[in-house]
Amino acid sequence: MATLSPTAVKFPQTHHGGGEGAPPFYGGGGGDGRGGGSNSPDYGQRLRRARLGLVVGITPIVMLFVSFTSAYIVRQGLPTLDVRTSTYVHDWLPVHLPWVLLLVNTVILLVSSGTMEMARRQITRQAALAPVRSIPGVSLGEEKIFPWLPFTVVLGVAFLIGQWEAWQELAARGFYLATSASSSFVYLLTGMHAIHLLGGMLALLYAAITSLLNRPVEARRIVVDITAWYWHFMALLWIYIFALIEIAR
Amino acid sequence: MATPGVVHAHAAPQGFIRKYIFSLDHKVIGIQYYFLALAAVLVGMFLSLLMRIHLVWPTASIPLFGEIKPETYLTLLTMHGTIMVFFVLTTAPQSGFGNYFLPIQIGAPDMAFPTLNMLSFWTTFVAFVVMIAAFFVEGGAPLHGWTGYAPLSALPGAGPGEGLGADLWITSIAIFCAASLMGALNFITTVLDLRAKGMTMMRMPLTCWAWFITAILGLLAFGVLLAAGILLLMDRNLGTSFFVPGGLSVSGNLVKHSGGSPLLWQHLFWFFGHPEVYIAILPGMGVASQMLSTFSRKPIFGYKAMVYAMLSIGLLGFVVWGHHMFMSGMSPYSAFAFSIMTMAIGVPSAIKTFNWLGTIYKGRVRFDTPMLYAIGFVSLFVSGGLSGPFLAQPVLDIPLHDTYFVVGHFHLIMGVAAIFGMFAGTAYWFPKMFGRMMSESLGRIHFFITLAGTYAIFMPMHYLGLAGQTRRYSQFTEVHYMTQLIPVQRFMTYAAVITIGAQLIFVVNLFWSMFKGPKASDNPWEATTLEWTTATPPPHDNFGGHTPVVNHGPYEYSVPGAARDYTMQTDPATSTAH
């Protein structure tokens, strides 16, 4: 399936598809998953598999935060027994969030999502053109390479520093982890999100290292592609968490 | 997900460590899981033996162990339950057999993400080591039961094992969750993306369907348990109050927590816990279906109905967690809803049972040991399942909940039925895994003793429960009305000693046959699915360089007009094929 001539013609078409960056499908015949017994790596199939794995892998993360959310909502409406007076009281203490700071963080994360997308499209283009470049005598004008990936990592670090600052600010306002159920949840949700974002940054570092190791661009593209979708998911998740702790507080 | 690790067809590894320890081969990983579960089941069984002995001879001094104190009894109970549920019932049927045979049965060279697969096993291994370590730390293992109800599990001072032991227990469970999620991710992607040409979803063997649905359940359930575990660890170590209510005092000291809800833990735990029951039993259902069809020489009765029944069992499994909490003072309206939904599970379960019976009916049944174990599975599933609708009703559950009735119920249906599924799977696939046959005569002896012994242990529990004997009590000799029931307990202990002793036959058979059993042919059972088309044991890439093409459904036995009474899935398509 990996013969050069038909695929080389196809690639610019998928690139022309633009926006969604549809993966070039190799050996899509029958859609039975595995293309032939050829030993040459089938990047289109690998990419599809990795994307499928990502979607499946995001599910338990969603379940994790669904659980936290349900606990949050339930706990918020729960009266607790005051042992001194033997009466039921509402002890939910609305947290005064440093929302300006959090808004800045949100913007940083959204911008990083944009740069991540640029990185994804850049490497998609490179991967699509790689087979054409390998044809002797074919030259395609040099493309300007902007370091979108390092840029994304820097923004990610900035976001995490901003979140840390927000924690400091919360503490300054008297809301520690164990102060009340509401502050526990705020620290829990932001902390768990930060941990998952850190996972995405490790993946980006991995992608950066593989680019130094002279791996084929098609293989690196898979890492960047699924990390990008994961990164977008992280941005969405953060907006959800921010909305939850800001609106339902 | 970070590392794509999508090695398409990795080269056969050289060297002992890459080949047998940190192997990427799903077959090696499957066997690793199997032996991990075997080690775990021996530990779990030993703990149950100690409990049985203590119940009947409370003052007896056990060699190397001393006298069992009430808190030690609770520790045994906790660790028995935890080890059995997580490291045996979840590990062997799904991760063990599933890892080995899912890719082969769908015609794939390996799992979708081999590196993740290896990581998943070694994470499970670490979880097991951490769990066992709880025995050896100060204060010993925890005593909060396998369900880890808060606040007992949330307060480090609440009992002898509730310090470091409980922290290790929760950490182990959390690690296990992560490992199971990796496994589930791999199973689902493999089924969706790696099926061979012609292997449509509706041509998959029911074993693959069972593993697939189990993986989906795991994917949705383990994240919730992980969330609960994180909250519990925070309550224990960071001073939060998610699960600990105010006003509690431990050893005379008022705890600092306030406002938490123990019920929140129960909701989160059982939202995981009930699907977990199906995670344990569904692979057994798949295995039983495979065997009943193969050894009756008949197609499975109602293949589609079987698939839809498993799907609906899986779906309903997520909306019935409240039936574990009828005792918690929930609103009768919620209890009613949970009750109705729970009893609805009886419908797909009955569909499965009748289809199994329909499969055997008028078949030319071969009573090889895998078939015996599969029949044993169906028998135990029915016996254990029939007490389910009783417990599903709040009005009956409230008096029965904390009695031996429940112990009998879940041991039959979730414990021993699933174990019989594993026995069946072992006897059936052993020739493919190790290239040799297991001893039929040892297998038969083991089957009959274990089946009779199982019923002798667990059936009387139902009567004890109806008579009001409470579970989790370490000693009945001091309570007047319960002393009259001691002879029944003594009978159960004798039965347990014999049954546990009989498991040695299985272990001996397993290891003896591995080295000394007669050589197996490629298809000793004359079965139809893909694992029987390849060499024994299968080569590194499963099919020796070529990819199977599937032309038939999974259970085409005794097809009219066919030359043999079984049509392999890879046989050339004929006009009579459907």
Image (cartoon, coloured by chain):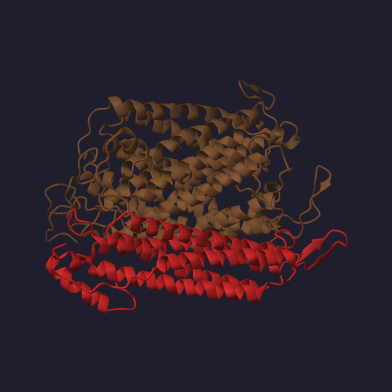
Res. B201 in view: no
Quarter of the picture containing the N terminus of chain A is bottom left
Colour chain A is painted in: red
Q: Quadrant of residue B373?
A: top left
Q: Nearer the viewer, residue B480 or B88?
A: B88
Instruction: State the brown chain.
Output: B
Quarter of the picture containing the C terminus of chain A is bottom right
Q: Is residue B359 left or right of residue A236?
A: left
* Residue at the farthest right position: A85
Taking the spot 71% from the left edge, 44% from the top edge, the residue there is B156
Q: Is residue B228 above or below residue A172?
A: above
Res. B387 in view: yes
Q: Is residue B180 left or right of residue B24?
A: right
Residue B11 horizontal/vertical position (percent): 24, 45
Q: Is residue B375 left or right of residue B13?
A: right
Residue B461 horizontal/vertical position (percent): 59, 40
Q: Quadrant of residue A206?
A: bottom left
Q: Is residue B14 above or below residue A229?
A: above
Residue B3 horizontal/vertical position (percent): 38, 55
Task: Count numbered badges in the picture.
Answer: 0
Q: Nearer the viewer, residue A214 or A207?
A: A214
